[in-house]
Image (tube, grey):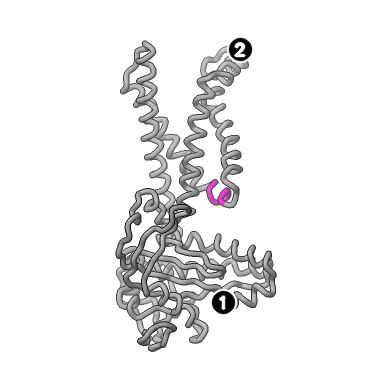
Amino acid sequence: MANERILRTRLRVQRVLRITAVWVLLGCLAALFEHDALEKNGYPSLLRDRLDERFLTSLLAGLSGGALYIFVLRDRWRKLPYTKAVGVMALLLLAIVVVLSAVVPAHRQQSPDFARLLGERFFSLQFLGTYLYWLLLMGGTMLMVRLNDQYGNGGINYLTGFYHKPRQEMRIFMFLDMRSSTAIAERLGHVKYFQLLNELYADITDPILYSRGEIYQYVGDEISVSWSLRRGVGRQRCIRCFLNISRKLKARGAHYEARYGLAPIFKAGFHYGPVTTGEVGLVKKERIYSGDVVNTAAHIQNQCNAHGVDNLISQDLVEVLRLPSNYRLREIGSTELKGKRTAIRLWTLVHDANTEASAAPGEAPLQKM
């Protein structure tokens, strides 16, 4: 779990640094526009001075503001509507700008007429411009973070048009499904069951994102997650994703028992192979994966109940994973799958309290039972 916390912190630090880099770039552009406006209106201006002012301000604001949002506010505001979250941020930002742009400068002048100086600064176009600049910057940042959450780790590909034309790829798929979901839905009713699914999706999202996985589809209580072969095999991310999900749901078991009268358990099927990846649709574009590997992974997951296990991994994926020695695999054997002409050899990962989901890579080969 310590390694998982380190990974989570590292990913958040990377996001703060990206926010800071964008803020510094926008600050430099603002300095350029400011310099151009001053010169056009006949005021003396040095571009280097404008850049120095904006660069330092943007750097400090990006590091402090980005860290505040990513480390403290984002998780708390994640379930709020975007407009409501921006409204709360607007109030918080107003207090910060008032202190830094009005109170502190007025206090530095050490004038007996402090209230008048404060009012002049507060009710000025300069104050309004400063506040609107940082509000738009913060609002835009929050929007981009939410869009990244919406599309997952592959969101940047929607902007670059990477999949505008179909591409051939090797990808890993994990199909997750909640055990006994039909009986649970009948017992809880539609509304309560929907609340359960919403909480479950919220709980398992971070383990998926921290494993660099991309959520492909939500279908009822089933979730399909995908990785590029290199990313999913690296540090055994695809397997550790499932282990971290199981561990998190076990840690939250008391909450689910108290609220819904059950402790949810997910089962998973893993497979990898070639797919054709591309975007379809003119409105509400969606990325789809076409290939036998997708259906095979889904059918592998369907075999979990038959074999009394919570995970099944294809022989093809086992051969490329190179799991460390503290991961124990048990052979299930060759199994006939629906729609497949030939049987597929399956393995299950035997995991317990001694299985470290965040074990370091590069250890001895896996142990097969």
Q: Is residue 144 left or right of residue 196?
A: left
Looking at the image, tell me whether mark 2 or mark 1 is earlier in sequence order: 2
Inspect the image, locate mark 1, and give the three-letter code of the amino acid beneath it. Arg
**Screen quadrant of the C terminus:** bottom left
Horizontally, residue 239 falls left or right of residue 105, namely left
In the image, residue 150 sits, relative to residue 43, either above or below, namely: below
Q: Residue at x 52, y 63 (%)?
A: 204
Pointer 2 local density, CA inside 10 Å: few below 14, some 14–19, many at least 20: few
Q: In the rendered structure, which segment of residues is drawn in magenta?
A: 73-78
Locate residue 25: give its quadrant.
top left
Q: Residue furthest front?
A: 282
The residue sitting at 50% across, 24% down in the picture is 129
* Residue 180 drawn in magenta: no
Q: Residue at x 39, y 28 (%)?
A: 30
Q: Secondary structure at mark 1?
A: loop
User: Marks 2 and 1: which is nearer the front?
Assistant: 1
The kind of secondary structure the magenta stretch mainly shows is: helix
Label number found at residue 113: 2
